[in-house]
Image (cartoon, grey):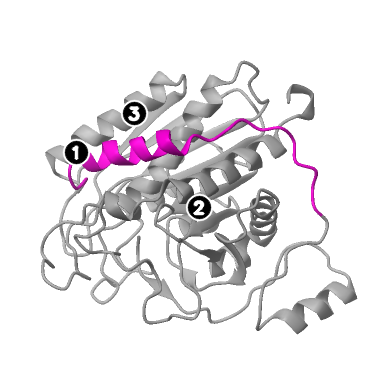
Amino acid sequence: MSFHFKIIKTGILGGIFSALTLFQSCQNHNSSEQTSTQEAILVQAPNFDSDSAYHFVQRQVDFGPRVPNTAAHVACGNYLAEKLRSYGLEVTEQKFSPTTYDGTKLKARNIIGSFNPKASKRILLAAHWDSRPYADEDSVATKKPVPAANDGASGVGVLLEVARVLAAQPSKPEIGVDIIFFDAEDWGNSQEASDEYGGFCLGSQYWASNLHQPGYTAFFGVLLDMVGAKGATFQKEGYSMQLAGEVVKSVWNTAGQLGYSNYFIDHRGPAITDDHLPVNRVAKIPMIDIIHTRQNNPAHTFFDEWHTTQDTMEQIDPKTLKAVGQTLIQVLYQEAEPAVL
């Protein structure tokens, strides 16, 4: 996960609002981001297995840090592509060779798995799968790579379980789902890099400019980043509210209906430079970021072990994986054609 910016401007949510809604929005601007009082009827959705998702996180960590240009990175990438294929997804591997802010040439690949590839209505789900090459927030081992259990592997683990769940259903939802594991997200330095992303998000930038299918688009997208820690809180990320506010509201309302409002906090958080930005800005797909940020703690925005050698399996809680994964499954089934549910 990359660095963060403070929100500079509020942004304007899409659509036409009534005068009353605008007034209420202004009244609540400095407090919480109010969710809609009108709740959708939840359709029946399959169960997300948190133990299975935890296993997928563990499996990635077992390879060692998945730093580009290492054997662990190659082996884990092969594993991820094969798991998606084993669940019947159509897999595309998008290989590219970016140069990092410090002049390092990387052998990188985005891994894309498409569920129900012929469906016209598509939802995009994503997470980054690489590990940060150095633990710059560590108090001692600043030159060692990050194990990246939460900052990377947790989101990928949730999405692998989503793929498994979709594949296991006897009656498939009439919706297309594209899962992208972005590479080379975490090789940046906001203090030294000169580009607008601070050297981060290389895989998503490449994909957004080189879509894996000509003319590809999706109804909306959801990015997962750092979604496995104990007691995680997911505030409404600032850029997501600016660029895809209605998607944020829908996902947070769904989470609340499922009983996960202690994770999905009804409050606007900081704006984070992350993989959803190129997707929004270049690919023009409204994508939100579900990312762990802490309320009222600007000195420690993310979890304590962020970018340290302590980002290990000890930080991962199946309950958090469950909250995120079950919410995603429900969101997908809410978007599917009612006739097949």
Q: Is residue 226 magenta?
A: no
Q: At label 2, which amino acid type do we have?
A: Val
Mark 2 or mark 3, which has the lower sequence index?
Answer: 3
Residue 286 rendering spot, x and y as whole percentages? 60, 53
Separation of disc 2 and disc 3 at Cα? 22 Å
As shown in the figure, which amino acid type bears the numbered disc 1? Answer: Phe
Which percent across, then down, holds residue 227? 44, 53
Separation (CA) of disc 2 from disc 1: 29 Å
Label 2: which residue? 279
Q: Could you tell me which secondary element the residue under label 2 belongs to?
A: helix
Q: Is residue 212 visible?
A: no
Looking at the rendered structure, the secondary structure element under dot 1 is loop
- The range drawn in magenta is 39-66
Tell whether label 3 touches label 2 (CB within 8 Å).
Answer: no
Disc 3: CA contacts within 10 A as few (<14), some (14-19) or many (>=20): many
Disc assigned to residue 81:
3
Which circle's residue, 2 or 1, is located before the other in the chain? 1
Q: Which residue is mark 1?
A: 63
Is 130 left or right of 206, judged from the image as shown?
Answer: left
